[in-house]
Amino acid sequence: MLHSCRHLHVLIIVILITITCASTSQTDAQVAKMYLENKPEFDRTAKFWVEQYASPKSDTSKEDAVGRVCEMGFDKESARKALEKHKWDEQAAVNDLLGM
């Protein structure tokens, strides 16, 4: 839990920096608006982002990822190597395996 809290803290700092900087990005504006107008929703969203994108993958979820890539027609060894190379990002791994 402490590890996730650190990720959440870093994410909040990054988002706060984004809010304070002038930005033309629609997404940045939406995040800033959510932070200012609906802090509980912002906190739930930030927690989801940390859990989804900044938390280490468990061995079970890694095996699940290998299985999903193999279902697309790739062998297990190639799938695992591509996933490891791309930090377990399945889309990036498949693109790599397809030579994209």
Image (cartoon, rainbow, N blue to C red):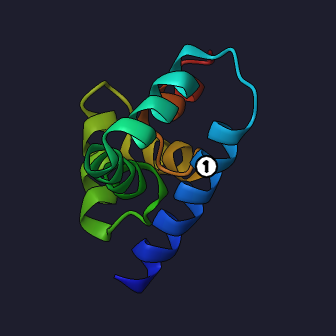
Q: On the picture, is 91 further left or further right than 37?
A: right
* Quadrant of the frame with the C terminus: top right
Can residue 10 be seen in the rendering of this structure? yes
Q: On the picture, is 46 further left or further right than 29?
A: left
The kind of residue tagged 1 is Leu
- Residue beneath the point at 62% across and 38% down: 19
- Residue beneath the point at 44% across and 40% down: 36
- Residue beneath the point at 49% across and 46% down: 83
Identify the secondary structure beneath mark 1: helix
Can residue 66 be seen in the rendering of this structure? no
Q: How many marks?
A: 1
Residue 2 location (% of width, % of height): 41, 85
The crowd level at tag 1 (other Cα within 10 Å; few <14, some 14-19, many 20+) is some
Residue 18 location (% of width, % of height): 66, 39
The image quadrant of residue 13 is: bottom right
* Quadrant of the frame with the N terminus: bottom left
Q: Which one is in front, 42 or 92?
A: 42
Q: Residue furthest front?
A: 37
The image quadrant of residue 35 is: top left
According to the picture, the residue beneath numbered tag 1 turns out to be: 16
Q: Residue furthest right?
A: 22
- Residue beneath the point at 55% across and 14% down: 26
Residue 39 location (% of width, % of height): 34, 48
Rendered position, 66 above or below 55: above
Q: Which one is in front, 81 or 43?
A: 43
Q: Which one is in front, 79 or 75?
A: 79
Residue 76 location (% of width, % of height): 37, 46
